[in-house]
Amino acid sequence: MNPFSSFLSLLLPLLVTLFLLILLLEQIWYLRRKRNVPGPNILFPFLGNVIPLITNPTKFWQLQAQLSASVGFSVNYVAGCFIVFIRNTELSHLIFANVKPDAFLLVAHPYGKKLFGQHNMVYMFGQDHKNLRRHIASNFTPKALSTYAQLQQLIILKHFKSWERLSSTVSPAEPIPLRLLVRDMNLQTSQTVFLGKYLSSEARERFRVDYDLFNAGLMKLPFDLPGFAFRKAKLGAARILKTLTHCAAESKKRMLQGEDPSC
């Protein structure tokens, strides 16, 4: 036996033992934090439950909601992060009111910073978070909300009428899937409320496509390579940001002219 093989045969049991020890410590670390709170009792090494979260997010969050039904919250472990799922309204208010840097971290997605951006509001804490909330507070005054409500009503009625026309063209016994119809209505409502007339018809369609790419990327593993859904989502998010920046610039021009807000 050559020296290298001899060294490897001695080293291999140590590496296997070290690996098993790391796995055991990870389980112990999780269980100590979990205690008696509802949540999974056994973890997949290192990744936790990130695979079910990505492959079937609806089922993942439904299960978390079921686990939290008894005490109002549940826990899980995703890609190295110990997460707490809150179902109770009062607990949610307490957590969102605490924006200190050492408080809870809001996990929008295990790889969300690569898509949402490092400086997205969901990742802000402390004084930065308070400053941004103060800046956007004027968007939610009773006067502003009344503007939004009028826009929403017009769009919702328009879509309801189109659904009624659609129902008259199909057999009464044939069901009409509402998921995509409702999604299109919600998308147009959001676009109009936030961006108003600053978003052209061409930009709206590009926005819709990019938003689809963004949502698809959230459901995939983060392979940031050409052709993969995650890369397409990043590029789509960059285009959406560019569109929003243009709309904000156009809005500022109108504001300088003293015109009333329409979105």
Image (cartoon, rainbow, N blue to C red):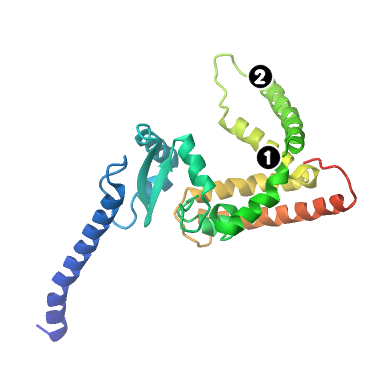
State the image coordinates of residue 72 (x, y, percent, origin top left): 40, 35
Q: Please give the name of the residue rendered at 85% of the width and 50% of the height, measured from the top-left corner.
A: 255
In the figure, residue 194 lies in which quadrant?
top right
Q: Amino acid at mark 1?
A: Ser
Q: Please give the name of the residue rendered at 55% of the width and 52% of the height, measured from the top-left corner.
A: 122
Q: Please give the name of the residue rendered at 13% of the width and 75% of the height, measured from the top-left corner.
A: 9
- The residue pinned by badge 1 equals 190
The CA span between labels 2 and 1 is: 28 Å
* Front residue (pair 119, 245): 119
- The residue pinned by badge 2 equals 169
Q: Please give the name of the residue rendered at 34% of the width and 55% of the height, measured from the top-left corner.
A: 47
Does 167 appear above or below 111? Answer: above
* Front residue (pair 192, 183): 192
State the image coordinates of residue 250 (x, y, percent, origin top left): 81, 53
Q: Decide if residue 3 is in sight here.
A: yes
State the image coordinates of residue 189 (x, y, percent, origin top left): 69, 36
Q: Amino acid at mark 2?
A: Thr
* Left or right for 257, reference 117: right
Do residues under tags 2 and 1 come within 8 Å of each other at their CB atoms?
Answer: no
State the image coordinates of residue 127 (x, y, percent, origin top left): 59, 58
* Left or right for 131, reference 247: left
